[in-house]
Image (cartoon, grey):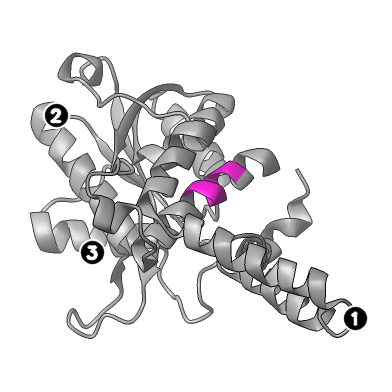
Amino acid sequence: MLTWIGPFKPLISTLLLPPASLLLLVLAGVVLMRFSRRWGKALCVIGAVVLWVLSCNATAYALNQLLLRSYPPLSVQALKQTQAIVVLGGGVELYAPEYGQATLSAAAYQRLVYGRYLTTLHDLPLVYSGGKGWAAPSGQVQSEAQVAANVLQRDFGLRFFLADEASRDTRENALRSYAILSAKGIQRIALVTHDWHMQRSLEQFEAAGFEVIPAPMGYTQPPMRWDTDYLPSSTGLQHTKRVLHEWLGRLHY
C-alpha cells in the first residue's frame, strides 16, 4: 500500500464520492457548453440524474447488496467462543457543548453501545480501537479511544480492558490491536462494527493474525416506503456514500 497517500485520503475520498464528484461533472458540463452545447448539456443531465438516483435509500441498499458482503447477527454461542470484544472507532465530535467535552460520533456511539450490550450476554474484556483518524481535525487533542473511555464511564459506569489509541485507519486498527492483545494471549475476538464496514474490517483483522467472529450492527435498511426510499434525500445520499466509500476502501487495500 502507498503509505504516503494516508494524509490525502479524506480529500481523495471527498472528490471521488458523491455529491462532489457529480457536482464536478455538472460543472464540467457547464464549461463544456462553451465549446459544444450538446455534450455540455449531456454531462449536466447525466450528473443530475445520477445524483438523484444515488440520493435514494433504495439505491444505497441495492449497492450494499451488490458491492459488499452482509453478515448475520452474532449468536450467543459464537460469542462464548471468543476471548474479547473489540469495538472499532467511528469518529469524534469535538464540538459538544452540551457535555462540555468531545464526544463520540453517532456511528461510534452505536458501536460502543452494541459492544456494551454484548458484555451483558457474556462477560468478556471490552476493547476499543481508535486513535486520531486521517480526517481528524487539527484541534483534536484526545484520541478517539480516550473519548470513548470517557463516554463509557459517563453513560455506563464501566472501563475498557484495553484501548488502542494510535491507529488512524482500519488497517492500523487491526495491526495495533493485534500487537496489544496477542501479548495478552488474546487472538480470538468478536469484532464490532457496522455491517457495511465489516467486510473490510474482517479482512484486515484476519490479515493481522486474529481469529475473528463478526459482530455486525447498524445494517443498511431495505426499502420499506416508496415515498421516502425511492425519492432523493440527504439520508439516502449519506447511506450511498458510505457504501461506495467502503467499496473504494477495499480496492485501495
Query: Going 56% across and 38% down the picture, which residue do you hit?
Result: 175
Assess whether residue 29 is covered by the magenta stretch: no
The residue under label 2 is: 123
| Quarter of the figure that contains the N terminus | top right
Q: Are marks 3 and 2 in contact (CB under 8 Å)?
A: no
Upstream in sequence: badge 1 or badge 2: 1
Indicate the secondary structure of the residue bearing disc 2.
loop
Upstream in sequence: badge 3 or badge 1: 1
**Location of residue 126 with respect to 111 vertically, above or below:** above
x and y percentages locating residue 127 in the rendered image: 32, 42
The residue under label 3 is: 150
Residue type, mark 2 in image: Asp
Q: Nearer the viewer, mark 3 or mark 1?
A: 1
Outermost right residue: 35
Query: Going 57% across and 59% down the picture, which residue do you hit?
Result: 50
Q: Which residues are magenta?
A: 243-247
The CA distance from mark 3 to mark 1 is: 58 Å
Q: Residues within 10 Å of mark 2 (few under 14, many from 20)?
A: few
The quadrant holding residue 150 is: bottom left
Residue in the foreground of this view, choosing between 206 and 166: 206
x and y percentages locating residue 13 in the rendered image: 63, 61
Q: Are marks 3 and 1 in contact (CB under 8 Å)?
A: no
Q: How many marks?
A: 3
The residue under label 1 is: 35
Q: Main secondary structure of the magenta part?
A: helix
The CA distance from mark 3 to mark 2 is: 21 Å
Q: Nearer the viewer, mark 1 or mark 2?
A: 1
Residue type, mark 3 in image: Asn
Residue type, mark 1 in image: Phe
- In the image, taking residue 102 as reference, residue 121 lies left or right, namely left
